[in-house]
Image (cartoon, rainbow, N blue to C red):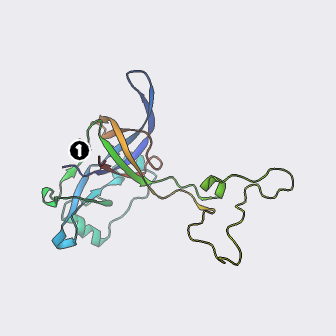
Amino acid sequence: MSIGSLGIKVGMTQIFDEKNASIPVTLIKIGPCTVTQIKTVPTDGYDAVQLGFDLSKKKVEDNQKKRSLNKALEGHLKKSGALTSRYLKEYHVNRPEEFELGQTFDITNFSPNQFIDVRGKSIGKGFAGTVKRHNFSRGPMSHGSKNHREPGSIGAGSTPGRVYPGKRMAGRLGGKPTTLKRLAILRIDADENLLVVKGSVPGKPGNLLSLTPSVS
């Protein structure tokens, strides 16, 4: 039973179909992931399966800082024998009894033409103004305008006398969890554990991703 998997973004490229049309694709290196915990309603209040993933083994992660295990996490992972796992992710399931500790999820759990949802952290772009962050239009560019890219007024004066929450203003852009839904798997490279997914996925190369089958 497939519930999803963790992987890393390798990068983007293009392939050509039978009509010689260019298709932009993303390469995602999958797992393998190990079942590190099985949660049930009597013990935890909900049904879920926890997967562990060792990101430090991947060659594209040379520039990432390796996470060390503390005693609590080491004792937790010792039950499943997945002491190399550095990242944990839960997936809700309907039948937790179908899984067992130490079970492996890899690229064999995916198939061509399958649709998946990909979740990861988007590229962080730092502090950005309203034009870049919210696509605001600029002010007049004539001499003396003094309002080229400024945000302008943010509200009335005495009434309401405050700024409403959620006001679109300058601030941090990107670097947030993002999900792209119903991305098609075009090809599978079992030798390299690579998925060839149509389109783009969040983040830069080396970004940690969570893949789950799309709900039709």
Residue neighbourhood size for the residue with mark 1, other residues' Cα within 10 Å, grouped as few (<14), some (14–19), many (≥20): some
Q: Which corner quadrant of the image does residue 90 belong to?
A: bottom left
Q: Which residue is nearer to you in this view: 105 or 91?
A: 91
Residue 2 versus residue 42 in the image, above or below: above
To which residue does mark 1 refer?
A: 109
How many numbered marks does the figure carry?
A: 1
Measured as percent of width and height from the top left, residue 216 is found at: 29, 46
Q: Nearer the viewer, residue 37 or 128?
A: 128
In the rendered image, residue 168, in percent from the top left (x then y), is placed at: 60, 62
Q: Amino acid at mark 1?
A: Asn
Residue most extreme to the right: 143
In the image, residue 80 lies at what x, y percent?
A: 19, 61
Residue appearing at x 71%, y 66% in the figure: 153
Work out which residue is located at the far top of the displayed protein and give it: 19
Height in image: 162 above or below 117? below
Along the line of sight, which residue is nearer the eye, 207 or 61?
A: 207
Element at badge 1?
A: helix
- The x, y position of residue 46, in whole percent, is 22, 68
Q: Is residue 152 above or below residue 136?
A: below
44 vs 171, left or right, is left
Give the side of residue 207 with respect to residue 33, left or right: right
What residue occupies the far front of the structure in this picture? 159
State the residue at coordinates (48%, 48%).
Answer: 204
